[in-house]
Image: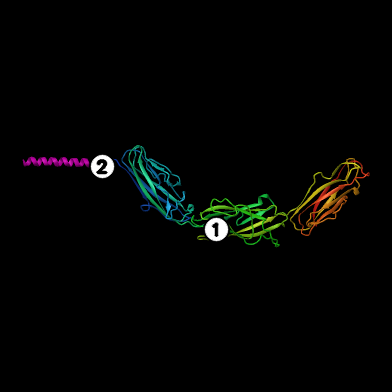
Amino acid sequence: MCLSFFMDNSKMRVYLLFLGIMAIVTFRLEASLNLAVTPYEGMSLRFGEVNSDSYINKEVKIRITSTDGVQYRLRQRLLEPVVSDKGEILNEGVLSFYTVRGTNAAGSLYQDTLRSLSTRDEILYTSNTAGDSDSFVVVYSIDGKKISQRGNFRGKILYTLESIGGASSKTYILDLSFNANPSIDIAIEAPSGKTVRLGTRYDSELKSSLKVKLNIPSENNIKIYQDLTEPLTKEDGTVLEDGVVKFFVSGLAEGESNYKNLSSLARGRALIYSSDEGSSEFYINFSVDEELIKGVSAGLYKGNLIYYFEGENINKTIPIGLEVEIARVFDIKVTSEEGLSFLGVKPDNPPQEKAVKVEVNTNMKTPYQVIQRIDTPLTDEKGNKIPEKFFRMKVELPGEDKGKTDFLNFQPAGVGDKVIFTSNAEGDPVTFDIIYRLDVSYEVVAGDYSTQVTYLLSEK
């Protein structure tokens, strides 16, 4: 009996040992799908201190182990927006990523060009159809130039590994963090270096602009003041009067300005922009008032604009030169509805009158004369001439003291050159009328009479 019992127990021990081996084998053959996400530095994605000049890359190695024999894929997204310790959401585009081509052994890598990291699902990798294990590298980047917020930012990247057509899936969350300390960058760009240039010679010179670029943290309040420190002045001391140059602010996406409409540029400090929304770009536009510029003395007027930038941790001054070149103008314009033609003249007709308007536009600020040149008497098509005593003229001047004439009353127009107007000492522009009168008598032969008159403008 003892022997039998011993053998029975031996069989039992052998049987139990066999079952144990079977259990172990069965456990080791169970299918698995595992994901390991490993930053090259530490256990989380830490970018450290980030300023406006920073561009930081961090590598993360992703290893996938699979014994399913089933194809799988890996997706990625931000679990939630990246937020600072002040509750501000990070601007999209600051964080980006790409997969490194050639770091995988099998399967297909996606997103191998730089793209923004966001809460959208992005497929990073799909295995081959056999579902073989694999690994690859993802690079995460942060661009300090795109940061406008200051603070400690934190976020989480969610990775989802799932079999295609199967039930297996794994997730992993990778923490990311950085301290944003963007620098303050303020600049003004002028078409000509550090000077705004306006002029009147060509239409293209009548306007110019400055581009203001603000790269500052979003929580910063900023105010910009414009100051024309002295009047625009020529070398001889002549001052350009206020209002000839106009300006306005345009292109505002953020911030406020009381100068969105055309305003006169005058001496003194003016608040032209204020904002608490951080980075911005806008324009300050300048132009010449074409009406007020008439009669302004020709020459180059120079002055200086000072721009003051004031706010939290902001105290900057930028000087900009301002030049206005008034081109020389010395023109005469003559207009007449009918010209000097007297039609249907008969001995018994009443007198006929013709009006001519003369406009002198000048900014030379020197005296001048208007000269009338009549080459021939009034003559008809047959060669008959009107005696000079019947063809008379007078000049009607404006009320203000712009100059003088010897033809305030009707007197013979005559033939040849005659000074019909002399300006004042300042050479001011003027507009005046000339009235030509034909008195008819029985000495006149009936017909259509005319003559050619030329008007000359000459410095005195």
Quadrant in the picture for the N terminus? top left
Q: How is the image coloured?
A: rainbow
Quadrant in the picture for the C terminus? bottom right
Which residue is nearer to you in this view: 230 or 258? 258
Residue under circle 2?
A: 28
Q: Is residue 294 visible?
A: yes
Determine the CA span between mark 2 and mark 1.
70 Å
Q: On the rendered structure, is 355 left or right of 304?
A: right
Q: Is residue 375 visible?
A: no
Q: Look at the numbered disc 2 and give the secondary structure of its residue.
A: helix
Q: Quadrant of residue 11?
A: top left
Is residue 5 found inside the magenta-colored segment of the image? yes
Q: Position of residue 453 (x, y in %)?
A: 83, 47
Can you say whether 149 is above or below 385 in the image?
Answer: below
Residue under circle 1?
A: 223
Which residue is nearer to you in this view: 263 or 51? 263
Q: Amino acid at mark 1?
A: Lys
Specify the segment rendered in magenta.
Answer: 1-24
